[in-house]
Amino acid sequence: MHRYKCLISIEPRSKTMHHPKEQILNCLTYALLAIVAICAVVLLCDISSHRDRFFYSKKDPVVLDLTISHAPEVLLRPDPEYRGRNVNCTFWDCLNIYKCEHDTLKVYIYPLQEFLDEKSDKVANTLSSEYFQILEIVLKSRYYTSNPNEACLFLPSLDLLNQDMFDKNLAGPALASLNFWDRGENHLIFNMLPGSAPAYNTILDVNIDNAIVLGGGFDSWTYRPGFDVSIPVWSPLVHQTNSIPIHNGAHRKYLLVAAQLNLLPQYARTLTELMSTANNAEQMLLLGPCDNNQLKSRCTLTQHQKRWEYPRVLGRGRFCFIGRSLRVGQPDLIEIMSQGCIPVIAIDNYVLPFEDVIDWSLAAVRVRESELHSFIRKLESISNVKVVEMQKQVQWLYSNYFKDLKSITITALEILESRIFPLLARSSRQWNLVRQNSHSTFNPLFLTSLAPKSQGFTAVILTYDRVESLFLLIQKLAVVPSLQSILVIWNNQKKMPPHLSTFPTISKPLKIIQTRENKLSNRFYPYPEIETEAILTIDDDIIMLTSDELDFGYEVWREFPDHIVGFPSRIHIWDNATMRWHYESEWTNQISMVLTGAAFHHKYWSHMYTYAMPGDIKHWVDDHMNCEDIAMNFLVANITNNPPIKVTPRKKFKCPECTNTEMLSADLNHMRERSACIDRFSKIYGRMPLRTVEFRADPVLFRDNFPDKLKRYNDIGSL
């Protein structure tokens, strides 16, 4: 009895003596409980350590080996768990966004494996050079991660690009055998040629469950909007053809070129009938296969065949035809775009590549299959100017999104990234904007969701010889908190500007530039001295604005950097009597222009004004010494389709110290000239781009009965 007490040491000494058998039983019970507790602790520690190693280990990145000869063999299970494609998948149902880190899209690539049927040793697929390139592109991109625990999306190394090149009965089990398959959740499937004979379905005939399909042959019945991504069908002929200069589409020989080989017979007959009834035999060029059946050549469908080099022959037409064939998606689209030809797409319900972000109405003509007999008249009605615009759009889309497999792959991943992280998404305008000049500065159309950190603004003062008001304006600008620097544009060539030592002493950088010619457009020149994105253009006689007004105007511009934001506002109206546009300076409930005598704009617009102003507007402004502010409003509105923003209630901007004879606006012909400017500019643009609004921006606590110390902007001024 004492031996057990000594061993367990849990029985206190007591004057009451228990039965020996009872004491032995108690000791055994306590011993058993202690052993169970110790085993449980050891087991939990072991499980925890394994879990931590799996989820939280920080291993060195594993370099993915894409050497095909090193790919291990994987025997497919005879009865794997896999399910059919979920036709009802949406972004919200079948994508686990909780696997995606904040603002970071990462893609894990499965190592290369050779999947074999356990019974027949048949290989599931063969890796094509195109899919190998796609894997390599993702591997070298910013999206790749070697850690599956960090991955948002998973990319199998199983090549499913062309359904004719793999065994669809083995592809499903091969996918289901992947380590992280989990019913296809967050998995990407690249497929350009779905379906096989005789049905040629528009979706991959493989059991992929909830996987995302990046497919090249979707129609509106099989495409899952917001979940799948429509991609183009790649053509190796594009890279095998030497690049040649693309001629202006308006001066190409043929209106329409049709060189599609696999066109369905009924559509080929329709094109032949159109060609035989065309007013001009040179209007259409209808081509088919040559006797040698080479892909790089096409021949005319006449008794005396004329051979054309393909796809270069597409560059001889303004428009190029794509019709329905056995498969919906065709490599002809990329071949047509590579030659700067405008696609004419006659395939009903075809989901065009990257249709979620690309506005195809700017670069292609869609024709209903039932209207093929009359679509030539539709093409003839498109003006030469429109043809050139569409051709430029085609070339820009091709060079940015279609020119090689890298562009296609990265664009598809960017679309997925914009869905998962919508705050980082580009707008439709940004996806489709043709940059006017390759040397342009930062484009304000690519806007962030939140205003960037304040850089301050550069005040550009256009002056001639009003030194007194210039000095007073500089002193007022110097106390604005958001001012970074001042640039004085001395527009007088007959008189030297005052010496810098005579200027007011301020704490901000001040520079003076004397121009070579007296031009109003000098205020918009993109001077290298301007280091900020925001520019305040201001006349030397605008000395009535307060520091709070200017600072508030800059804060509004930060929220809307693609707009003109400023103080003096004007409106354009249509005069039914003269059938012309009219410039109006009277106070109304609407505005459509903010004058650049006191306004903020992005420095990108200065670059556009100087180097990309349409027509002869810039020269006309310089010759007439008027309307440069109207020209800037037209330019911005035409590109953005956005109105300007007027800030604060101030409407009077006359210089109190200046006489009317000193002011340009004192000229009696001034208003008539400005009306003529609006009318002339609208004809050059071919439309009226100015947008009318009925609001202005004021501080939140403006005119509220709050103590001044609670208001950020106290001195907003009056009318």
Image: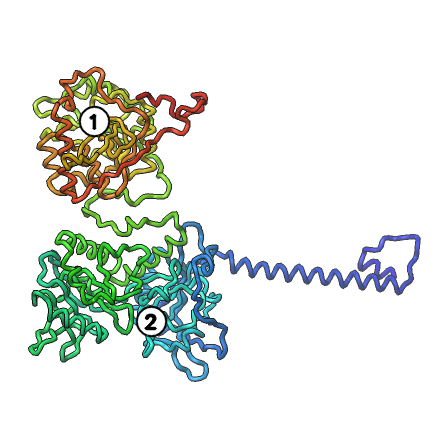
**Viewer-closest of 394 and 142:** 394
Q: Which residue lies furthest to the right in this view?
A: 16
Q: What element carries label 2?
A: loop
Residue 110, label in figure = none
Answer whether labels 2 and 1 touch (C-beta < 8 Å).
no
Alpha carbon of mark 2 to alpha carbon of mark 1: how far? 63 Å
Q: What residue type is labelled 1?
A: Ile
* Mark 2 crowd level (few <14, some 14–19, many ≥20, 10 Å Cα): many
Residue 128 visible in the displayed image = yes
The residue sitting at 88% across, 65% down in the picture is 21
Q: Is mark 1 on a helix, strand or loop?
A: strand
* Mark 1 crowd level (few <14, some 14–19, many ≥20, 10 Å Cα): many
x%, y% of residue 454?
34, 34
User: Does residue 647 appear to the left or right of 237 in the view shown?
Assistant: right
x%, y% of residue 664?
14, 23
Which one is closest to the eye, mark 2 or mark 1?
2
Residue 516 visible in the displayed image = no
With respect to residue 261, does 414 lie above or below?
above
x%, y% of residue 476?
28, 21
**Viewer-closest of 367 and 296:** 367
x%, y% of residue 697?
34, 31
Query: Would you name the residue on which mark 2 appears?
Result: 194
With respect to residue 407, does 696 lie above or below?
above
Query: Would you name the residue on which mark 1 appears?
Result: 461
The residue sitting at 57% across, 59% down in the picture is 49
Q: Which residue lies furthest to the bottom in this view?
A: 120
